Amino acid sequence: MAKAGRAVPHPAEDLATIRERHVAVLAHGALIDELETWPKPGLVSPVDSGSHRDMDAETLRRSARAIAPYFAELARAGAASAGLPDLRRIGLAAEVAMLAATGGVNAHRGAIFSLGLIAAAEGVSGYVTASAEARAARVGALWGRAIARHPPSALSHGARAARRYGVGGAAAEAAAGFPAVRALGLPALRHGRALANEDAGAARVQCLFALMAELDDTNLLHRGGRDGLAFARAAARRFLDGGGVGAAGWRDEAVALHRAFVERRLSPGGSADLLAVTVFLDGLAAA
């Protein structure tokens, strides 16, 4: 019998908390996996800062730690049937925490948006078992129309590039249920595992290059315009056509491409965000 004045935890509440925390752990893990993927053309890794002068690997680690609790909060909000405005308020709070942790550097704004919607969708669904593809599509089914009507801030570099060049960007990808992740990212991650004898890091490289080869990456457009995007997509396609991570000497080739991207100050940040989305969805489906 419980002592007077002491609350008795409700089993369902305890289970909900465990599930929310699990979502946050997987989201944080996806961000760290993306960071530690190498070689990764133009992007920050533990090896170097790539084409980025304002951040390094430790910046991204601090950011990932700061925003991780908000993914649990977003899952909780989804379970409570919160609307998109409420989810956005939580996302903005996560951005404030990110900027405080990084000294004002935008390390993960795109990831907060994309991974945050997936986390919230987990709560809405009641954490039911589903494929990674079904989980991605769920976001579009739940909030696609609302995102299309009221996309995220138009002030970001990616949003400005999307308008200037007439491409969809992160908001369009989420509104449609992450079609690039379903058609490119997840199949490439699985294929990469097969090519590289279950080497998880190599599989992530394969996934990144598959996304780079097809995506209208607004970060590349912002930094290099259409020529920069075309250069990056052609380089990624050559890598894949040559056997990807299954080819002899693939790491050397990827490192050479990294140097070429840095020389041109190119960074496929949109593809990197979708790599994290892919890893997150894959982890949720495997849990």
Image (tube, helix red, strand yellow):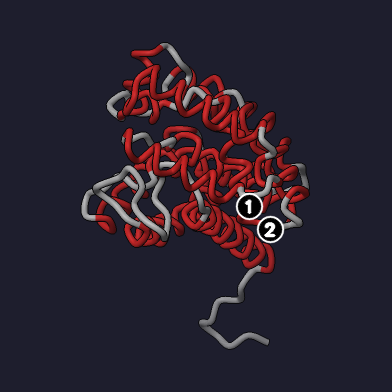
Please tell me the numbered disc located at residue 199. Answer: 2
Residue in front for this viewpoint, 76 or 131? 131
Name the residue tied to disc 1: 202
Q: Quadrant of residue 142?
A: top right
Residue 235 horizontal side relative to residue 9, left or right: left
> Is the residue marked by circle 2 packed among few (<14), some (14-19), or many (20+) residues within 10 Å?
few
Please tell me the numbered disc located at residue 127. Answer: none
Question: Quarter holding the N terminus?
Answer: bottom right
Q: Regarding mark 2 in the picture, which secondary structure is present there? A: loop
Q: Amino acid at mark 1?
A: Ala
Above or below: residue 254 compared with residue 283: above
- Residue 115 picture location, percent across and down: 52, 44
Q: Who's the residue at 41% across and 59% down the image?
A: 47
Q: Who's the residue at 41% across and 26% down the image?
A: 218
Residue 285 horizontal side relative to residue 109, left or right: right
Question: Quarter holding the C terminus?
Answer: bottom right
Q: Is residue 282 visible?
A: yes
Residue at the left extreme, as displayed: 103
Q: Who's the residue at 63% across and 34% down the image?
A: 181
Q: Who's the residue at 30% across and 45% down the image?
A: 52
Q: Amino acid at mark 2?
A: Asp
Residue in front for this viewpoint, 184 or 64? 184
Q: Regarding mark 1 in the picture, which secondary structure is present there? A: helix
- Residue 198 picture location, percent across and down: 74, 57
- Find the distance from the CA under tag 1 to the CA under tag 2: 5 Å
Above or below: residue 277 compared with residue 219: below
The reply to whether the C-beta atoms of the residues labelled 1 and 2 are less than 8 Å apart is yes
Q: Quadrant of residue 191?
A: top right
Above or below: residue 251 compared with residue 266: below
